[in-house]
Image: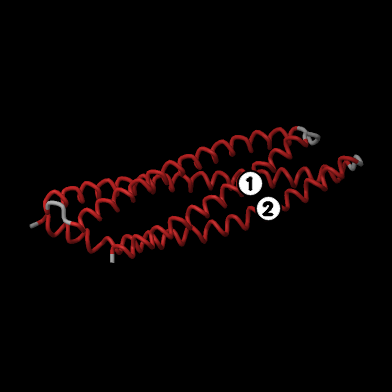
Amino acid sequence: MKKNILMLAIVLLAPTLSIAQTGQNIKEIKRDKKIILRDQQELNQFIIKAKEYIEADSINATLKIKNLHRGIIDDMEREISQTSVKINQAKKEVARSQKEVRSDSREVKKDKKDLAKINGDKDSKRDLVNSKRDRLDDIYDTRDDKRDLEKLKKRLKKQTKLKNKFSKNKKNLKAFNEFIGTLKADVDQNKKELREDKKELREDRRETKEKR
């Protein structure tokens, strides 16, 4: 009796969980767009400051170089802080993806039991195929989330190293330019994550439609 109640609860909750997941993806898409806009604006500001700095350096404008250098170091520290925040968010994404894989595995196990009980029912076969597909998608998502997390960790380490080099040596334009390169890579990664979140939203909407 308890098993039947549990199974009924799972069936009733499935559309609600799918809708909740869709809402989560919409929230992430909005967040991604805000981050991309902010990061792109900050990247553009870095490029403008780089041009000013190179021009000041070429004419040996000591006071201007000093003032620009101080401001650029502050900007670098801000970017490093933002990368740390992104790492914490990426860790949450990995944990969420892993949780979804575990949930999918339980669903696959349940669907296999259902299929064995009713001996090849058409709907149960379809449910099992869908559950296996969902689990595979989430396994791929988890792999991508882990890869993104590692990229962010490496970027943080590189940004900190470059900031320290430029802080010690105002003439180290190579370190400055490489730091700008990390910002470009960050924008590219954020755009990639936005594409992935949009793809997940489409998949979740399709799944919600199938479960109704």
The disc at residue 79 is 1
Mark 1 in CB contact with mark 2 (< 8 angstroms): yes
Q: Secondary structure at mark 1?
A: helix
Q: Which residue is mark 2?
A: 42
Q: Could you tell me residue 191's position as x and y percent? A: 57, 52
Q: Which residue is more in the foreground, 70 or 52?
A: 52
Placement of 130 over or under 153, stated as above or below:
below
Viewer-nearest of labels 1 and 2?
A: 2
Amino acid at the residue labelled 2: Glu
Placement of 73 over or under 21, stated as above or below:
above
Q: Looking at the image, can residue 167 be seen?
A: no
Q: Looking at the image, can residue 17 be seen?
A: yes
Q: CA distance from mark 1 to mark 2?
A: 9 Å
* Left or right of 10 in this view: 101: right
Amino acid at the residue labelled 1: Glu
Looking at the figure, which quarter contains the C terminus? bottom left
Q: Which residue is more in the foreground, 164 or 50?
A: 50
Q: Could you tell me residue 36's position as x and y percent? A: 60, 55
* Left or right of 171 in this view: 30: left
Q: Earlier in the sequence, mark 1 or mark 2?
A: 2
